[in-house]
Every structure is written in C-alpha cells, then in structure tokens.
Amino acid sequence: MNKTNWIPSIILITSPLFIVLAIVLSVLYGAKDIDALTVWHAITQFDKGNVDHNIIITSRLPRVIAALCVGAFLAISGAVMQGVTRNYLADPSIMGVNDGSAFVITLAMVFFPGLPNYQMILLSMVGSAIGAGLVFGFASLLKDGFSPVRLAIIGTIIGTFLSSVATAVAMYFQVSQSVSVWYNAKIHTVNPEMLWLSIPFGILGLLLALCIAKSVTISSLGDDIAVGLGQRTKWVKIISMLSVVCLTGTAVALVGKIAFVGLVIPHLTRFIVGMDYRFVIPCSAVIGATFLALCDVISRFINFPFETPIGVVTVIIGVPFFLYLIRTRGGERHG
C-alpha cells in the first residue's frame, strides 16, 4: 500500500510531542507518584538533599531516555533486517542477534570483570555479529534455510543454545546473579555513564541505516530486481548488518535483552507510511522509542507496587503478533 508523503512528515513533525508525553508519564508515575511541580524544581533547582529530586534526576530521567533510545535502536534494526532479507519475521531477538550480544557480555563478565563501559558496548557488538553470523551461516547450509519460518526456527535454536551456554558458564563461575540482568532487561537500573556512551554508537547505527535506506527499499523488491537496477547487493547487506550490529549491540549492552520490538514496530510503521524505507527507518525510530517508553510505564502497574520486567510487556504484545504473522503469511517473503 503506497502512502502519500504527508503521513510520515506528520509523524516526524509531531514526534517531539509523543516523546515529551512519554517522558512526562515516565517521570511522574511509578512506585511513588511525583507531582509536576516537583519535577520542574528537580530540573531547574536540583537539591541533593531532596529524595524526590534524586529519584527524578538519577533514576527516572536516565530510565526513560534509555527506553527511548533502545526502542528506537531495536525498531530500526528490525526494519533494516526485514527490508534487506525480505523476511517479515526478521527481528534481532528472533535471529540470534540479541542472544549473541548477551552471550559475549556474559563471557566478558566472567573472564574479564571490571571492563570499561565502552569496551562492554564494543564486545556486545561483536556478540551481535557472532549471533547473526551463526544463524545465517546455518541457514545457508539448509535447503530453503532463508524462508521466514525456517530462519526463525534456526534463530530460536541458536539463540537458545547461546543462552544455555551463557547460563551454564555463569552458574559455574557463580556470577549468575550479575548476568541475569542482561537476560531480563535491567532498564530500571540503567547506568547513566553507559547511557551517555551508548548514544554516539546508536547515532552511528542510525546514520548507516539512513545512508542505505533507498537501497533497502530496492532490496525489499528482491535480489534480481535490485541487481537489474544496478545495486551492489553485497555492499548493501554488509552495511545493513553493520548498522544492525551497532544498534542491537548498543541496546543489549545498555539494558539487556528486550524481545519483539524489532518485529512489531517495523510492520506497524510500514502499514502507516508504506514501503519506502527512507520514511520507514526514521518513523520506526520514533514509534519504537515511544512504544518502549510506554511499555516501561505500563510495566510499573501490572503488579503494583512491584515492578514487572519490561520484557514481559513486549512479549505479551509480541508473541500474539508473531503467531498472527505465521498464520496469515505462511512461509512467504514480503516485498
């Protein structure tokens, strides 16, 4: 379905309103409700001795900024993967990318404890590349290995294997308590220093994705058409995977594994703005950021006053959507 250009323009122009709304809701509501005036004073007249001010500045603001960044990063990753592979089930959490990151982070925490935050981000990216490489490598060895459902099965198997090995290693070296946060999304305890370090890496991944947005649109039509139009498909796939590795690795290093954002949001975005990835990628970033920030707010009230992991909320939304895609789309590729 082709959409006129004014729809993505409206989304991008109004995006600051949605983001501000998500920030306001996240800062105001939680185990302890804080009034708007206190929030304003915390930002403009911060008082170290005020408990509410400390909650806002050191916890809730970094938390919502992390949710916005991670939501955008994962949504862009999913959009790029779906466009380049023409696989409507492509998602970092399904294709082993998230699990590869968490696996390498686990090894780093066991064998190289105390690494600087920027090295953890870089290692997480390496893990993303390893996870994706294993999944696509195995898929290339099987007949019809790149069909959507079969690739999803391979990704699930590889991801489960990496998670199991990481868990076994963590238990053997008695660091399972520390490692568990990477598998259960530690967005409520986000490290502010890690957050500020993550943003430049995320921007790099976004810029790579935007640079190949037009090429991704052509790739989504099929390799034969892309080659016929003179596109260097190999380079497009390499740059797209660099973007995915950068974005996903940064997201996992920052808050741990969060599933299905990269699956649901690109589909929703394409339904709204059409198939042109020059619009799909930036709009996915906006919608993904807002979506995850609101999921974080919802997670605080499911079992109030205790917090539910944000991953539970995304799974509740993502699993039915995943099953719906399999039921309605079967084994076909999109494009």
Image (tube, grey):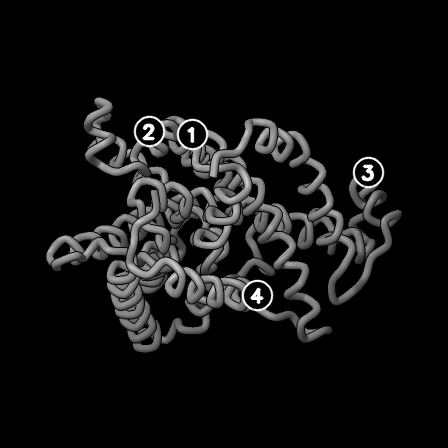
Badge 1 marks a residue whose secondary structure is helix
Badge 2 marks a residue whose secondary structure is helix
Name the residue type under label 1. Answer: Leu
Residue 300, percent across and down?
Answer: 68, 66
Label 4 sits on residue = 313
User: In terms of sequence position, does the residue under pointer 4 or pointer 2 come before the other?
Assistant: 2
For image coordinates 32% across by 68% down, the residue present is 163
For image coordinates 33% across by 29% down, the residue present is 215
Q: Considering the image in quadrants, where does the C terminus appear?
A: top left
User: In terms of sequence position, does the residue under pointer 4 or pointer 1 come before the other?
Assistant: 1
For image coordinates 51% across by 41% down, the residue present is 284
Label 2 sits on residue = 215
For image coordinates 73% across by 45% down, the residue present is 21
Q: Which of the pair 182/331 is nearer the observer?
A: 331
Name the residue type under label 3. Answer: Thr
Determine the CA span between mark 1 and mark 2.
10 Å
Q: Which mark is residue 210?
A: 1
Q: Among all residues in the image, which is located at the extreme top?
A: 230
Q: Are marks 1 and 2 in contact (CB under 8 Å)?
A: no
Name the residue type under label 4. Answer: Val
Residue 79, percent across and down?
Answer: 42, 43
User: In terms of sequence position, does the residue under pointer 1 or pointer 2 come before the other?
Assistant: 1
Q: How many marks?
A: 4
Name the residue type under label 2. Answer: Ser
Label 1 crowd bin: few (<14), some (14–19), many (20+), radius 10 Å: many
Q: Which callout, 4 or 3, points to the residue nearer the camera?
A: 4
